[in-house]
Amino acid sequence: MNKVYVPEGYRPQLDAYNTQRAIEYIKRTFQAEFSSALHLKRVSAPLFVTEESGLNDNLNGYERAVSFDVPAVGLDAQVVHSLAKWKRLALKRYRFDVGDGLYTDMNAIRRDEELDNIHSIYVDQWDWEKIITQETRNIEYLKLIVTAIVDAICNTNDRLRVRFPQLTNCLCRNVAFITTQELYDLYPNLSAKERENAFVREHKTAFIMQIGGKLDCGVPHDGRAPDYDDWLLNGDIFFWNDTLGCALEISSMGIRVSPESLDRQLTLSGCDDRRNLPFHKMLLNGELPLTIGGGIGQSRLCMLMMGCAHIGEVQSSIWDSETVKICEENGIPLL
């Protein structure tokens, strides 16, 4: 079913050529701001991993990875959904120290994604991971990192508006922090997405915390894989999107599971079979560093700052014929 939404009176703020220039400027500028703020070094990352490694992110648990056999090595490979687990292993392999971290350009295919204005089967994001200590494995440190990321985003947006005065989108630096249970208690009669919209509409920028575990009502706010984020120490960064009139998730992130929280979450989610996978064995045995990390959507960040109505205006992907037709008729230029 087609889910494209056309904002009334929408017109792109930049022409095709300047759109490409602005995309390049956003990515280059934010990368510098972000890596400097969090003390991260750039590394190269895989497009695919072996199925048997257990390194692929299973997202909400139902998405199918794009798989293919590799005759030369006699194994099956999967195109990554994200690099949530790979990054933590890379920090150990590269011998990073406490306080250091890495970031990388992550490109993924999510074949089961429902397509709309902000969802595509092609995913591009900055994946990052940073080594922390047991003493900083807490909510206060999580909030500190979130604030630094939001500042990097807002700094980039301020510089973009100087370079391209046609762009008028302002972003709020003040982050409102709230847990999913507190959010539910505020809006018990709304759906999870409606609760996000109501809260971010009021506060403009928000970090919604503790995603994955069940709320008091018996269901989780949203799904999270049990083997990367600690469900008590994670969350999503949202900005209010004036063009679409909704809360736009820019980043999913969190302090990663410890051996204890991984053990608990595998059991709660019915995924005890993963305990025998190489990555999970290392983690349960305490052989991997304690970390914080996440992903920041590149295309979403661009469409937010440029006031775009559709993610297809800032990335090349595949769309159904009805979406293409509607966008053509309403002046939404898909790449």
Image (spheres, rainbow, N blue to C red):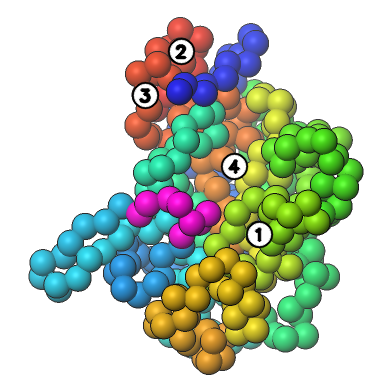
Residue 235, by quadrant, is bottom right
- Marks 4, 1: nearer the viewer: 1
Of pointers 1 and 3, the one earlier in the residue sequence? 1
In percent of width and height, residue 222 lies at 65, 50
Helix, strand or loop under label 3: loop
The disc labelled 1 sits on which kind of residue? Gly
Estimate the spatial distance between the alpha carbons at disc 4 and disc 2, rounded to whole Å.
23 Å
The disc labelled 2 sits on which kind of residue? Ile
The disc labelled 4 sits on which kind of residue? Leu
Query: In the rendered image, which residue does mark 1 sit on?
Result: 212
Estimate the spatial distance between the alpha carbons at disc 3 and disc 2, rounded to whole Å.
10 Å
Estimate the spatial distance between the alpha carbons at disc 4 and disc 1, rounded to whole Å.
24 Å
Residue 132, by quadrant, is bottom right
Query: In the rendered image, which residue does mark 3 sit on?
Result: 320
What residue is at 47 percent from the left and 81 percent from the top? 275
Residue 171, by quadrant, is top right
Do tag 4 and tag 2 residues touch (Cβ < 8 Å)? Answer: no
Q: Is residue 59 magenta?
A: yes
- Marks 1, 3: nearer the viewer: 1
Is residue 298 or residue 182 the one in the foreground? 182
Q: Is residue 61 magenta?
A: yes
Q: Quadrant of the C terminus?
A: top left
Q: Which residues are magenta?
A: 58-65
Q: Which mark is residue 301?
A: 4
Density class for disc 1 (Cα within 10 Å; few <14, some 14-19, many ≥20) is many
